[in-house]
Amino acid sequence: MRKFGYRVVDLLVDHFANVRHGPVGAKGEPAKLIPLFDVDPPEQGRDPNELLAQLEREVLPNNLHVDHPRFFAFVPGPNNFVSTMADALAAGFNVFNGTWLGGSAAAAVELGVVRWLARVCGLPKSAGGLFVSGGSMANLTALVAARHALLNDHTENAVIYFSDQTHSSVERALRVIGFLPEQLRKLPSDENFRLSIQTLRDAIGVDRAKGLRPFCVIANAGTTNTGAVDPLNELADLAVKEKLWLHVDGAFGAAAILCDRGRKLLSGLDRADSISLDPHKWLFQSFECGCVLVRDVSLLRSAFQIKADYLRDVHRLTVEFNPADHGVQLTRSFRALKVWLSLQTFGVAAFRDAMTRGFELAEIAERELRARKGWEILSAAQMATVCFRFGESSEVQTQLVDLMMKEQFALLTSTELRGNAALRLCTINPRTTEADIVETIERLDQLARAL
Ligand SMILES: Cc1ncc(COP(=O)(O)O)c(C=O)c1O
């Protein structure tokens, strides 16, 4: 066990220490990769060292390294080593984090970290929540609470509002929990990619006139596309007036409230009925680690709690916190441990500085792009995100993504902004240096000009 464990730790340490010196990762060919693993396991076990060597050869390099300092695609996953070790402990001790009876200390750690996050977001003492797999599950969990609290689960004629910049996981969650496409209003965002209050107000008016039941508005605290933050205070005012549930999808951006720059942008977050916040994005945790926060945690409990016969010992004492009563999963891994251990190890100030760095890196990228001819900024740096293009051709932007992927020096991906293909850099990795950004833009510039 020790030998095997030490080799695994060595692999991890080498990865953390050296990832920046290697390629940003690779996308393997299906015809090559699938046959390697589409085989039955052996009847007799194999040598663990040989197996680790196989992983080093065939598995670990053939993924994109989302933690690489020059991985700027999608939302990077710049996790930290302490978080990684916490996952090893949680898995090794196989801690059951479903009930107080099964994992009392785990439940206490989770309660503590979740309450801290709720305080950071400005939610009142009544607030609580849960660690979940990620933003998708956080959105779904919050929307189940909203449906139960405001509709008593009767969804007929209920209507939900969100902007066209909202993450697809929201629409999927609504589909999963039984809303029909005709109950969803995907409203056009304004010139800054934000949900416009007037557009929302008009849509609610039209629906009320038809006898429909407006019930929930979903705001973004950092869209995936551009980092835009919807006008949270105005949305909260309207939600109160119209008796709507205000869910804020801050899976990407809400954690930025820890630093000064984020706090200014996220004014009004404290007025949400529920919030999604992903520690596996901008709080530097290993996958999977999302968090759902609800202003009144009793609404989460009443939406999810079912007292099964065989769990009668679990529900005897009401002071005990049972995570499973607040979400979809019964058996759950101990996700809170990594957040707790890394916060304790590094201190909040280190997280705050690392986040501020993300804001600055996107601004450096914007500066470098503006200094070169032919580049157009489509969405200025905000929340560690900048969108731009070279010329107007969609094909050119796509080719640039492919060429960068082929080079393996740095990776970015494209998106669509008002029908235009746009390149996008997401700069939340605090291990990214200014030189990483400058060299990435320089290479992009050379490739663009050669095209
Ligand atoms: C704003 C936003 N919401 C939700 C999600 C979904 O989160 P996850 O992939 O962790 O399920 C993402 C992921 O990028 C996101 O950026």
Image (cartoon, rainbow, N blue to C red):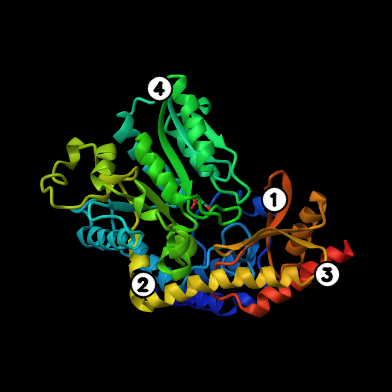
Ligand 1 lies under 8 Å from the Cβ of mark 1: no
- The kind of residue tagged 1 is Pro
Tell me residue 387's x, y (percent): 67, 58
Q: Please, what secondary structure does the residue beneath circle 3 have?
A: helix
Q: Please, what secondary structure does the residue beneath circle 4 have?
A: loop
191 versus 217 height, above or below: below
Q: Which residue is mark 1?
A: 30
- The kind of residue tagged 3 is Gln
Task: Decide which of tag 3 and tag 4 comes sooner along the chain.
Answer: 4
Ligand 1 lies under 8 Å from the Cβ of mark 2: no
Between 179 and 166, the one lying in front of the other is 166
Q: Is residue 420 left or right of residue 73?
A: right
Tell me residue 312's x, y (percent): 14, 41
Q: Which residue is mark 3?
A: 446
Task: Give the mark toward the camera: 1 or 4.
Answer: 4
Q: Is residue 288 left or right of residue 163?
A: left
Cα distance between the residues tagged 1 and 4: 44 Å
Residue 262 visible within the image? yes
Extreme-top residue of the structure: 210
Task: Decide which of tag 4 and tag 2 comes sooner along the chain.
Answer: 4
Question: In the drawing, what numbered circle is on residue 156?
Answer: 4
Tell me residue 51's x, y (percent): 55, 66
How many discs mark residues in the rendered view?
Answer: 4
Question: In the drawing, what numbered circle is on residue 343?
Answer: 2
Mark 3 vs 1: CB contact within 8 A: no
391 versus 153 height, above or below: below
Cα distance between the residues tagged 3 and 1: 30 Å
